[in-house]
């Protein structure tokens, strides 16, 4: 049977599982996915009414696409629903790829699309910050999070060690950042832990009529330090927009949380180093999202600029500590 017919047959079987007696009217691919293909399915129910659902098919041959990881993501989606975080709701899990030959998840459909270049930056960054704070409000004190992967000091130290061979062959800046992370990992006081998205950026949000209506792509949801999400989003905002917009987001997060983000520069270095080592992969997602202004040259230069800024903030913090110690000794 030709691949197209095979796919249509699988889609028809899926429709019968979620809407018995219904039929598939049309499909539409959603842009921006890197690790999974997203499609909207327009379904006519048996009673003649219409419904839309989102189909997420994991297309990459990596750890995130393994059946146990996809099943884990489905469980994360139930946690997101329980916590009242704006996001698609899970409808069906096909972890072993019985329908399409690859793992898949069916979700409720959220109308809208990601917004990358807003007219009202203040409202946009404020809503990004507010949605992230709702995620970080999910804590072990309020929910059973014992089954989630934990990425705190030990996990981050392991990541730093794992990156060493790639860093050694990369650039002087990468080596300087890596050395700073190694020196600081045991000095940082960690916050939380809280539930973190671990890939929070505008491409993983859905907007409709100027409102953020949902956060998507929960593949890497885990327990961690909330500053890791803030730093990740700041990097993407710097690459897509500029440093001023990225800093406006951080300012909105701090204002709405009525708290501070001490030593955020450590997480800027951590996430920035990962970006520097992996931006070829990130660039694929930017291309698929039709962000033509985000070139490879722009990506690398801005990642490097962000890393240098974080290194300067570290140096400034170190000088402040030394001055404080000197005053106490006087």
Image (cartoon, rainbow, N blue to C red):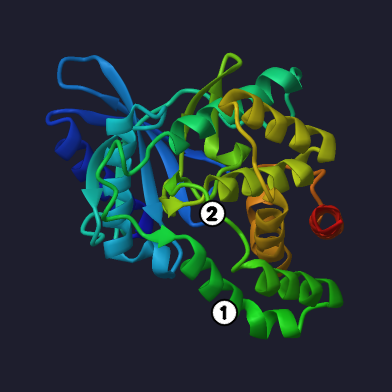
Instruction: Count the labels in the image.
Output: 2
Please give the name of the residue rendered at 66% of the width and 62% of the height, measured from the top-left corner.
270
Q: Is residue 289 visible?
A: yes
Query: Residue 287: image x %, image y %?
Result: 69, 50
Distance of mark 2 from mark 1, alpha carbons? 21 Å
Q: Residues within 10 Å of mark 1 (few under 14, many from 20)?
A: few
Badges 2 and 1: C-beta atoms under 8 Å apart? Answer: no
**Residue furthest out toward the left:** 20
- Residue that carries the numbered disc 1 in the rendered image: 162
Q: Is residue 263 above or below residue 85?
A: below
Query: Residue 71: image x %, image y %?
Result: 26, 55
Query: Residue 15: image x %, image y %?
Result: 22, 37
**Residue furthest out toward the front:** 330
Q: Secondary structure at mark 2?
A: loop
Any mark on residue 190, and which? 2
Query: Residue 157: image x %, image y %?
Result: 55, 72
């Amino acid at each position: 049977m030709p691949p197209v017919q095979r796919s249509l047959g699988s889609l028809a079987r899926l429709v019968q599982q979620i809407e018995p007696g219904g039929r598939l009217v049309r499909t539409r691919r959603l842009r921006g996915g890197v690790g999974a293909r997203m499609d909207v399915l327009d379904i006519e129910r048996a009673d003649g009414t219409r419904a839309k659902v989102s189909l997420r098919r994991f297309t990459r041959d990596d750890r995130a696409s393994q059946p146990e990881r996809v099943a884990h993501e489905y469980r994360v989606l139930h946690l997101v629903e329980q916590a009242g975080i704006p996001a698609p709701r899970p409808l069906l899990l096909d972890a072993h790829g019985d329908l399409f030959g690859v793992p898949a998840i069916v979700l409720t459909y959220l109308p809208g699309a990601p917004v990358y270049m807003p007219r009202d930056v203040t409202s946009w960054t404020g809503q990004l910050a507010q949605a992230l704070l709702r995620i970080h409000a999910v804590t072990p004190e309020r929910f059973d999070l014992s089954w989630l992967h934990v990425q705190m000091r030990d996990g981050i130290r392991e990541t730093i060690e794992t990156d060493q061979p790639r860093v050694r062959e990369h650039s002087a800046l990468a080596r300087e950042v890596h050395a700073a992370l190694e020196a600081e990992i045991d000095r940082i006081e960690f916050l939380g832990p809280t539930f973190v998205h671990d890939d929070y950026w505008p491409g993983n949000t859905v907007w409709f009529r100027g409102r953020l209506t949902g956060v998507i792509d929960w593949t890497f949801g885990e327990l961690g330090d909330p500053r890791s999400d803030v730093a990740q989003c700041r990097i993407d905002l710097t690459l897509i927009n500029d440093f001023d917009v990225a800093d406006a987001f951080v300012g909105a997060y701090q204002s709405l949380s009525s708290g501070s983000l001490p030593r955020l520069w450590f997480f800027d270095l951590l996430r920035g180093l990962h970006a520097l080592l992996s931006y070829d992969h990130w660039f694929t997602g930017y291309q698929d999202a039709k962000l033509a202004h985000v070139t490879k040259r722009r990506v690398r230069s801005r990642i490097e600029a962000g890393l240098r800024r974080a290194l300067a903030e570290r140096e400034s913090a170190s000088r402040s500590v030394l001055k404080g110690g000197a005053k106490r000794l006087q």
